[in-house]
Image (cartoon, rainbow, N blue to C red):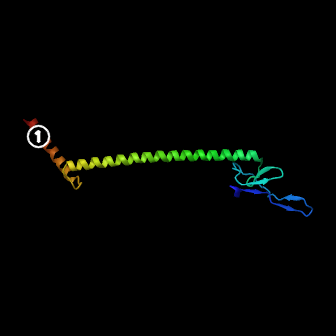
Amino acid sequence: MTKHILNFPTKSDGLGIIVQNKPERSRKRLGCDHDRVWLDGKRRMVECRDCGECMEAYDWITHLLRHHLWKFSQLEETCRLIDEAGTRLAELRREEANAKARIRKIVNDTGEADGSYGESVIRNKQWRAEVKARRERRSLA
């Protein structure tokens, strides 16, 4: 964090007077977070290096604290959402395993160990045809 905080660059004009050398700001940024600042120890002020806004050190510290607390709350929310997604994923994996087990049981009960469904479909069609033929015979009798 200290890499973003710099003292004002100063130079002496030869008379023992210190001249502040601050860069000129051509425009102010809207929505600036004031992450990079200049510290003026003489006036005890903080100036944003991006937008040029001057503020008291206490105000800057409280602004920084609020900003980091907001980021921390966003991080907690993201972690909560990740945990919920992990729980849901585990439930879906369990449901998938149960469905696969049910399919295996059905296939094994029909006697088709290789897992092909062709024979059972043919048998089902044959059975339906037989049932239909019996109904027709009954209706004719």
Residue pointed to by mark 1: 134
Residue 13: percent from left, percent from top = 89, 63
As drawn, is 75 to the left or to the right of 124? right
Corner quadrant of residue 135 = top left
Residue at horizontal 76 percent and vertical 47 percent from the top: 57
**Residue reaching furthest to the bottom:** 14
Question: What is the three-letter code of the residue carrying label 1?
Answer: Arg
In the image, is residue 93 above or below residue 18? above
Q: Nearer the viewer, residue 111 or 141?
A: 111
Q: Quadrant of the C terminus?
A: top left
Nearest the viewer among 34 and 3 is: 3
Does residue 74 appear to the left or right of 28 in the view shown? Answer: left
Using the rendered view, name the quadrant where residue 130 is placed: top left
The percent coordinates of residue 131 (x first, y second) are 14, 41
Quadrant containing the N terminus is: bottom right
Q: Residues within 10 Å of mark 1 (few under 14, many from 20)?
A: few
Q: Position of residue 36 (x, y in %)?
A: 71, 54
Q: Residue 102: horizontal and vertical position, in percent?
A: 28, 46
Question: Disc 1 on helix, strand or loop?
Answer: helix
